[in-house]
Amino acid sequence: MPKRSLSPVLTHCTILYRTVVRPCLLFSSAAFVVSAYTPCQAVPAHPGTDQTHSPHAGNRSATAQGAGSSSATPASKQAPSGKLPADKAEPDPLRDVSKALRNAHSPAEARALERRAETLRQKGLSASTRLLLESGDTNLKAHDYRKAEAALDNALVLQPDKAFIRRGRARIRYAAGDFEGAISDLGVALHLDPDDPLSWQLLSQVEEERHDIGAALQAAKQVLVVDPLASGGIKRVKTLQATLDGRPI
């Protein structure tokens, strides 16, 4: 008789971490921190078993076909699918940090959570996207808004799901005086990431430049919803409210 063979192959992968730290005007006044990792998933083993031929092999095959779903492989022997059940989905670190930011107990804690959230937003960038963001930042500092915007246009082609890149392009458009373009970008950015206080702050500034004080006030209030201890947040709301009411500041 041929011997039964069981040869699982286990593959161990190493997670690679790369961190780039440099100042960037496009995204916040703090350091532009990019933390990216590329996980490698292990390939599940599929043990194969040689079948033993016997006069009763045909009968066993017919019985299995007639059994239908009742002859399914037990769950303990099924190959892992690699997906978690809906009720055991992986937690979203950014959502957890944003929730903690809403409940921060001190300005120092809020600043730390703001930096953590921004790092998570910039996680998973490709090398090409990082180079384009650096190019956009360099050109923004040089007031070459056309080249800066073109660099972020290309970055969005590569990774359109990154809301903070749209916020960066909105900042460039705002600096160039394209208020409508900036608001359009911020609308998409906030749809993707409604808990981003930097996008709300920028929207408030743009609306104030457009002399829509009511809209600027609403955006400033939203900053305090997602980041109650935002630096200067309460003062700005009071200033805009006084301006809207026609009262001296």
Image (cartoon, grey):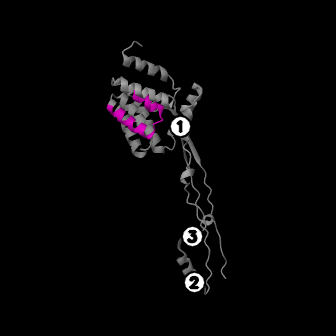
| Label 3 CA crowd tier, 10 Å (few <14, some 14–19, many 20+) | few
Determine which residue is flagged by label 1: 119
- The image shows residue 77 at horizontal and vertical percentages of 62, 66
Q: Label 2, on which residue?
A: 59
| SS for callout 1 | helix
Residue 215, given in percent of the width and then of the height, sits at 37, 27
Looking at the rendered structure, the kind of residue marked 1 is Thr
Within-10-Å neighbours for mark 1: few <14, some 14–19, many 20+: some
Question: Where does residue 109 sit, x and y in percent of width and height?
Answer: 59, 29
Residue 151 seen: no
Q: Residue at x 41, y 27 (%)?
A: 218
Front residue of this view, candidates 158 and 72: 72
Q: Is residue 127 above or below residue 12?
A: above
**Marks 3/1: CA distance?**
46 Å
198 is within the stretch colored magenta: yes
Query: Which circle marks residue 72 in the picture?
Result: 3
Residue nearer the viewer, 141 or 118: 118
- The residues bearing labels 1 and 2 have C-alpha atoms spaced at a distance of 62 Å
Q: Name the amino acid, label 3.
A: Ala
In this picture, residue 62 sits left or right of residue 27: right
Do tag 2 and tag 3 residues touch (Cβ < 8 Å)? no
The local secondary structure at tag 3 comes to loop
Comparing labels 1 and 2, the label whose residue is closer to the camera: 2
- Give me the C-alpha separation between circle 2 and circle 3: 18 Å
Quadrant housing the N terminus: bottom right
Quarter of image, res 213:
top left
In front of the other: 194 or 8? 194
Magenta part of the protein: which range? 180-204
**Residue located at (55% from left, 54% from top):** 85
Residue 96 part of the magenta segment? no
